[in-house]
């Protein structure tokens, strides 16, 4: 496996998702990459922080912007294990992030359910990276919650 492949960075996002799982948070993880280097890591913290906006992507955007010293994430890639919701896709647009790569689709709450362009027009999108692993973690989480 290429050290700087989409699969490599998605595995790093999956590590973050597993941290969320261990905290009984919905297991979504994200990393932001610039120049083939991870500059931000995050996972869902909505329960921990009692904050509905504390999604993995939002946490990662804040961390990356603080590191870079500016709100724009041009020339960066967001890797996230689940398709971003409308809120996170809107925030991604405001960051002007160059690339979005996600694992599992979210037909119920994912941004693509809305038939309008939410992301920045220059953002490229790649879907389905390690989709089975990303989906399995979410399925395991919700099965555990129901039992």
Image: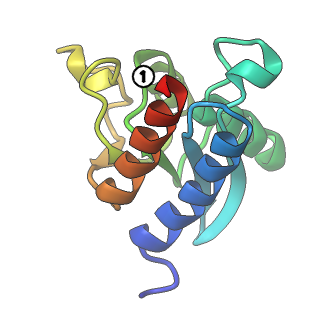
In the image: residue 48, left or right of residue 80: right
Which secondary structure, mark 1? loop
Q: Is 14 left, or right, of 49 in this rendering? A: left
State the residue at coordinates (39%, 40%): 139
Q: Residue furthest front?
A: 147
Compared with 115, 60 (above or below) is below
**Extreme residue toward the left, this view:** 115
**x and y, in percent, of residue 104 in the image:** 33, 44
Q: Is residue 101 visible?
A: no
135 above or below 111?
below
How crowded pointer 1 is (Cα within 10 Å; few <14, some 14-19, many 20+) is rated as many
Image quadrant of residue 131?
A: bottom left
Task: Quadrant for the N terminus, please.
Answer: bottom left
Q: Is residue 57 left or right of residue 89?
A: right
Q: Position of residue 83 (x, y in %)?
A: 37, 36
Residue sitting at x 62%, y 35%: 56
Where is residue 65 drawn, in percent x and y?
Answer: 74, 39
Residue at image location 60% in from the left, 43% down from the top:
73
* Residue 50, picture quadrant: top right
Q: Is residue 63 visible?
A: yes
Question: How many marks can you see?
Answer: 1
* Residue annotated with mark 1: 85
Q: Position of residue 53 (x, y in %)?
A: 65, 15
Judging from the image, the colouring scheme is: rainbow
Query: Looking at this view, is 66 or 51 the one in front?
Result: 51
In this view of the protein, which residue sits in the foreground, 102 or 25? 25
């Amino acid at each position: 496996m290429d050290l700087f492949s989409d699969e490599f960075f998605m595995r790093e996002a999956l590590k973050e998702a597993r941290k969320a799982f261990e905290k009984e948070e919905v297991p979504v993880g994200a990393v932001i990459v610039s120049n083939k280097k991870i500059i931000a890591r995050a996972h869902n913290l909505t329960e921990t922080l009692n904050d509905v906006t504390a999604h993995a992507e939002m946490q990662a955007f804040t961390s990356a912007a603080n590191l870079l010293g500016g709100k724009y994430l041009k020339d960066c890639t967001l890797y996230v294990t689940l398709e971003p919701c409308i809120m996170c896709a809107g925030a991604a647009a405001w960051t002007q992030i160059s690339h979005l790569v996600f694992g599992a689709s979210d037909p119920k709450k994912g941004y693509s359910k809305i038939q309008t362009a939410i992301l920045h027009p220059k953002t490229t999108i790649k879907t389905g990276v390690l989709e089975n692993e990303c989906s399995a973690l979410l399925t395991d989480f919700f099965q555990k919650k129901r039992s």
